[in-house]
Amino acid sequence: MKLPTRMKGSGPDAHPGEDTGGWLPAEVRQAWGRLPEPVQRFALPLLLVVLAFFYPKYAESLPGAFPAVGTLVIMLTFTMMAVGLNIVVGYAGLLDLGYVAFYAAGAYTAAWFASLQFEQVSFHFGSVGISREAVGIHISVWLILLIAGAFTALAGILIGLPTLRLRGDYLAIVTLGFGEIIPQFVRNGDNIFGFDLTHGTFGISPIDSPGFGKTLEDAIGVPASFQQSFDRAQWFYWAALALLLVTVFCSVRLRDSRLGRAWIAIREDETAAAAMGIPLMRTKTWAYAIGAFFGGIAGAYYATFKSGAFPSDFYFNFSVFLLCMVILGGIGSVWGVVVGGLLLAYLDQEGLAKLGNAFSDVIGKQIDVPKYNFGVYGLIIVLMMLFRPTGLIPERRRKKELAEGVHDESLYDAGR
Amino acid sequence: MDTLRGLVPRSIVSALGVVFVGLLLVWVIGNFAQSPSEFFNVFLIGLTNGAVYGLIALGYTLVYGILQLINFAHGDVFSLGGLVASTMILSFLDLSTADSAIVIGLGVAATLAVAMVFSSVLNAAIELVAYRRLRNAPRLAPLITAVGMSFFLQNVGLIGWGVEYQSVPRLVSNSVAFSLGSVEFRWNKLAVLLITVPVLVGLIYLVQATRQGKAMRATSQDPEAAAMMGVNVNRTISFTFVLAGGLAGAAGVLYLLNFTTIRYDQGFQLGLIAFTAAVLGGIGNLSGALVGAITIGLIEAFNEGLTWYTPGSDWTRSIVFGLLIAILVFRPEGLLGERTPEGQ
């Protein structure tokens, strides 16, 4: 039996105006404090967004350590998945070790509805950069992002309904199980009673590109199809940035909504939340569905960027990679997860190789650092959990939970 | 059990369960009728694999029983144990099939001892470094740490032994020891059983009949009460990890003897399968882990070896994990487990 240790730390509402800018000189802080409230709140994010928006324009002149625009597309997409995962893990406190299943679902939705896969039919709706005579289903990629989100959310609900009543660690295992089954299903899915659903280990490729179509291209000069456009990476980058911003916006708004407060209540103490009248199953299922929704969109977008969905991408390792982003950034903290996601995705795509080269130059021996990437992520997870469980940018509330010790003793079936 | 109450009436769930088990029986009997001798050979393969899974599954169950922690890193302790054993056999002892039976026997015994000690120390060190600090943290914190630890250990194996499979000579021959009818008992399978059974008997004796075992059982029931009764809880937990690590090391050696190859990332997959076995039998329950492991071993072997209406090895993992999900959803207490107020 464990008693909640309320006495440790300070009271639950002790710091309304916590002083976060301690490293700035006092005059600067005072001047900042005199600015109108909206400026204080939005100036910094706005500046970052503007800097991010023009990144492709000045990327060339930056030193070599900065990521290429093409890398940034991947970074943004992975970060979007991490923000989606943060809704499940961070807000609702449901450890999901099979998030890669949602990524797979999104990627394959894009592959089914925007490729030559189903050659039995020929259906076109708003697709760009592809001949009208091409077989297969070709729906506009913008629409597909929504379809993929909806389909993946549905998958999340279907997975969640039977499993969300399970206690935390059992839930983690069940999601892991789904995360292992779905890739195998995809790999073996080229012959389901004679029907080729997923094209097996080869994956489905090519996938149609997003774009604005011929009419808009002629009218205002935006590319008809991103893949065929001259500066392909830049357009994919802007679309990814927009998607990430929408995800972050939704994520922040959800956190402060009634649903978000219910999630956090469940995370803190499931029994107390249930006693306060929060419907546990429905609230958790919503967390799953919404987390899956963003994962599906990101998966579909990444598939169109790579122009393919391949089963070799969907491994348990990737789920842990996303989890590592959430933990590094700060469980439950949106901005933390964005930072953690960008940082880790950068390391994964470019950073480790560059660090490895620099390191090899210093010691004069070639070491293939990216080969050990998951060892690095594993180490990051362990070190963060041991020494800074709140993450790089802690969510204030979560910090208090950890300081006080949460009373989340094993309750097998609190939904009863 | 009303996990799905409100969605599906309980009677339908039970009926579906009965139908499913019935179909399974029909499938097993059908395969048996096709070719009884083939069936028994596959059965023996399943039993041997099940024994190796059992040793790993016991490690999961022991640790879960005492800390309620799914020790994800356990599978990687197993593969590191196997890798150390491969180095022992290849470099230190330089055993080959040409050596006499006595040399091989002693060499295997020495390898077993080294691998078990190594894995025990490693497992206890993991607990000390990574889990002990988190004992009062929210429950998911050590679980996440364990996942991270697992990846870290995998990469230790990768750095130490590289991506290639480490292959050792087939020390225990796979020739037929004796046969009953057309059922063949092979030496390597027999050796696995011959090593597993004494280890298990020893373990059960240790947990059931010794003072240390009593301390373990007390700690698993209620650590605070156990501490008040004079049990050194920290030492008991360390001891449990030592024990679990030793079993994983033994499993690594047996795996190596049976299949002759091992690689840094095999522990993770096997660990998940063994964990499924532990859950199937009822996690925290020692004999349950064995029953579950043998069941899983048989399911795998049947799926991969039998021919009559069998999905085949492409689907093995899906079947194992499908089973895991079904068990967790419909019968989380496992085959042999009992539902306790703590929700074990």
Image (cartoon, coloured by chain):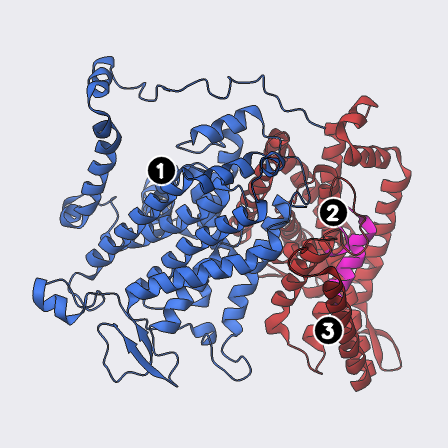
Q: Is residue A184 above or below residue A238?
A: below
Answer yes or no: is residue B174 visible: no
Q: Quadrant of residue B65?
A: top right
The residue depicted at 23 percent of the width and 15 percent of the height is A30
Give how far apart the Cα atoms at labels 3 and 2 are: 25 Å
Q: Residue at x 54, y 49 (%)?
A: A282
Q: Which chain is blue?
A: A
Asked if both marks, 1 and 2, belong to the same chain, the answer given is no
- The residue under label 2 is B61
* Res B60 visible: yes
Name the chief secondary structure element in magenta: helix
Q: Is residue B269 magenta?
A: no
Left/right placement of residue A268 relative to residue B271 reads left
Depth check: A286 or B137 in front?
Answer: A286
Q: What separation in Å lies between label 3 and label 1 (alpha carbons)? A: 50 Å
Residue A84: assigned label: none
Q: Chain of mark 2?
A: B
Q: What residue does disc 1 label?
A: A335
According to the rendering, which colour does chain B have? red
Q: Which residues are magenta?
A: B280-298
N-term-proximal mark, 3 vs 2: 2
Q: Position of residue B279 (x, y in %)?
A: 72, 53
Q: Nearer the viewer, mark 1 or mark 2?
A: 1
Around disc 3, counting alpha carbons within 10 Å, would you say few (fewer than 14), some (14 to 19), or many (20 or more)?
A: many
Q: Residue B138 in the image: x percent, y percent?
A: 59, 34
- In percent of width and height, residue B322 lies at 64, 63
